[in-house]
Image: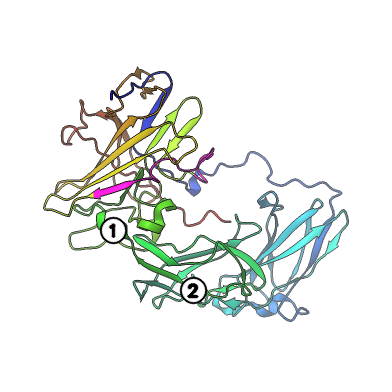
Amino acid sequence: MPTRAIAGTCLTLLGALALGCSPNDQKTPLGPLFMTAATDPMLSGAILGPDGTSSLCGSLPNPNGSVFRIRPINPAAGAFAAPVKFITCPNNLYSFNLPSGHYLLRTILPFDPAIGALPVRDIESVDIDGSDVVHPVVVHEGTALGGAATLDGAPLPDVAMTMVYDEAPGFLAADGGSDANGAWTEFFRAPYTLQNGVRYQTGGCGALGVRELEGPPASFLFPTEVSAVNCRLETAPSVQFSHTHTRLVVTPMPGDIGGQSVELADRYGIGWGVQFPIGPGQSPVHVPVSATHLFGGGLMVGIAPDRILSGISVQGQLQCGAACRDFGLDGVLHFTPETPIGRQVTWRYSDATSPEGVGLKVVQRSFDGQLPNDYVLFRFSIQNGGAATWTTLSSSKQRTTLTMASVSRIWAARSWVWPARTRPARTWERCSWERRCPGTPSGISPIFPLPVPRPTSTAR
């Protein structure tokens, strides 16, 4: 059967997409963040210790000098409702002018082990209905989070454990990880202590090259519903077909370079990501998750006027449309054993599982680089099995009609290791099977990973 030509609608193929975010991406506000009317009701009160009568300062390291902070959160807007107030002991009073509404009042204590069993973050619900409200904040002792992190039955240190509020998931409740025995600790103390009677969400068990056998629920009331979180992990099946021949380690998943998208994690686990340099005889690391230089990358196809088909989940990065991931969920895997020249991994998949699919079928092949060079090559062959025809649109805006039995244009990106706090030089160049990228074998285009810092948390 002849392959349908690609003609009619603009289609753009990107060989690799790096999704990143960094504090440097924040824009400086052009005006005040918070504006309150002079007639807004006043929320005020004292901040008290566990006995509910004496000042919180008596429970802090320095009753006459410790500094803590308090700030209202508007959960409906997912934003802070007023500027933060820094309070220096022995003062323990606060006040805010706020419009009527529902708020969460969060108090943050000093990051000091001397606070004992107090949670470092305390949150209380407050409602304002047109009148001034006096609300004393009482910071009660918390409870240690039980459980542990293990890999193949042994304790696994440095597994990240971040908690946010279920009612306001953009705001941090606690942050820490596992210690040498796998038990949960905060970065400034042990044990990991949470406020009682609060419903939390967690991002799960943060590690690379693992499959999660047991983990935390997406949402839970602590400690009534859940008092312990166990991250019971095993080595991921995807380790068996990851590229490890050179110092560049990459896990190839269908449409997903690095294997960080979670949709197939129940079968293959989470991949190694993209780790470099991993010397001879060394193993890629499971933790921290920031060890992968590429935390989101893969195949994307853009179809005019507003359709994007993606091989990774774009949730939280782009508007999903009918589906957050379109390619690869029906992937069929084949890979060769490791040989003196590396291995080849082949995935066959399509967009058939997506409501936005147009009948594209993909054969993705990846190849280990040849020592002493450090690289992994990816090749995407795309066939149009749908009823419509499409036209590719190159970066120079010149349309090229081609047969989708073998897509002829792939994008390659080169990047280099650079010192901290400096921006990399990036050179993008179009390669094709006819005009190969410099320094690579004829007929194959390399996809060089873009080192992008992985955010540890987007919570505030």
**Residue 168: which quarter of the image?**
bottom right
Q: Quadrant of the C terminus?
A: bottom right
Q: Give whichever of discs 1 and 2 has the lower sequence position.
A: 2
Work out which residue is located at the far front of the displayed protein and give it: 1
User: Which residue is at 39% across, 76% downward?
Assistant: 180
- 430 is higher (above) or lower (below) than 166: above
Q: Quadrant of the N terminus?
A: top left
Q: Give yes or no for contact between labels 1 and 2 (Cβ–Cβ under 8 Å).
A: no
Task: Look at the numbered disc 2 and give the secondary structure of its residue.
Answer: strand
**Dot 1, how many residues are within 10 Å of its Cα: few (below 14), some (14-19), or many (20+)?**
many
Whole-Å distance between the Cαs marked 1 and 2? 29 Å
Out of 380 and 374, give the one closest to the viewer: 380
What amino acid type should be assigned to the residue bearing mark 1?
Val
User: What percent of the width, then of the height, locates residue 98?
Assistant: 79, 53
Magenta range is 315-334
Residue bearing the label numbered 2: 185
Answer with left or right where residue 88 lies relative to residue 390.
Answer: right
User: What percent of the width, then of the height, locates residue 412?
Assistant: 29, 35
- 351 is higher (above) or lower (below) than 119: above
User: Which residue is at 38% across, 62% downward?
Assistant: 211
- Is residue 454 visible from the viewing direction of this image? no
Q: Does the magenta stretch include residue 328?
A: yes
- Is residue 23 visible from the viewing direction of this image? yes
**Dot 2, how many residues are within 10 Å of its Cα: few (below 14), some (14-19), or many (20+)?**
many
What amino acid type should be assigned to the residue bearing mark 2?
Thr
Residue bearing the label numbered 1: 239
Work out which residue is located at the far left of the displayed protein and give it: 340
Out of 425 and 354, give the one closest to the viewer: 354
> What number is the disc on residue 446?
none
